[in-house]
Image (tube, coloured by chain):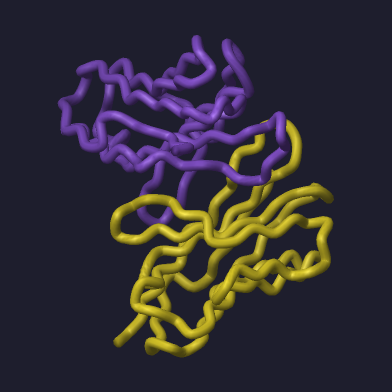
Amino acid sequence: EAQVTQNPRYLITVTGKKLTVTCSQNMNHEYMSWYRQDPGLGLRQIYYSMNVEVTDKGDVPEGYKVSRKEKRNFPLILESPSPNQTSLYFCASRDREERLDTQYFGPGTRLTVL
Amino acid sequence: AQTVTQSQPEMSVQEAETVTLSCTYDTSENNYYLFWYKQPPSRQMILVIRQEAYKQQNATENRFSVNFQKAAKSFSLKISDSQLGDTAMYFCAFMKNFGNEKLTFGTGTRLTIIP
């Protein structure tokens, strides 16, 4: 089954404690992206990756890091989380080789930073 | 930069009725895609319908259809014969064809179907 998986699905942490949210897709997609969703703001892109070892900032990258060492994985790293990073996070992927016009979303990760 | 505007924060409609959700966008691109995503209480983002900007014909998926007006930069979603399972947050989104193919989302419309 084609899917994007994220772990953990729920996380409560404290300010300053480093954390990683994993994202994995089994569709061999080149393009992957992270979004955060906040009430009244819709979803906003944090970082994206066009392929292995190719990453770039989205609209709200401050406080986040990413890496793309393998095609299937695109982890989101919060080195020193702060309460304003409390949000719902989505990973997404897209097949650019086939120019398919669909992005597939993971199930979301609800993060609370105390 | 692209912007997407959904001017209806909340809507409600009786079951079996038809409802239309509005979306306008702003872009200087000529080739792009437009989408409607549904987010039920489970929080999953579910693609409802897509439209390629170069196609004049409006997209249709079962009870869901769009009214795409490229010159007016308008992209509304019509849900016919609404069902209780249609209750969800609906997001309009824009994606350009090249480069960073991020989705630019509107702020969403919360739709409630009343039994």
Decide if residue A64 is on the left or right side of residue A53: left
**Horizontal and vertical percent position of residue A32:** 54, 29
Residue at 38% from the left image edge and 87% from the top image edge: B15
Q: Is residue B102 left or right of residue A18?
A: right
Q: Is residue A41 left or right of residue B28?
A: left
Residue drawn at point x = 32 percent, y = 16 percent: A79
- Chain B, hue in figure: yellow
Q: Residue at x 32, y 85 (%)?
A: B114
Counting from the top left corner in percent of width and height, residue A11 is at 20, 33
Is residue B68 shown left or right of residue B41? right
| Residue at the image point whose x is 71% and y is 56% from the top | B26
Q: Nearer the viewer, residue B85 or B21?
A: B85
Q: Which chain is purple?
A: A
Quick one: quadrant of the C terminus of chain B? Answer: bottom left
Up/down of A1 relative to B4, above or below = above
**Quarter where residue A90 is shown:** top left
Along the line of sight, which residue is nearer the eye, A71 or B6?
Answer: A71
Count the labels in the image: 0
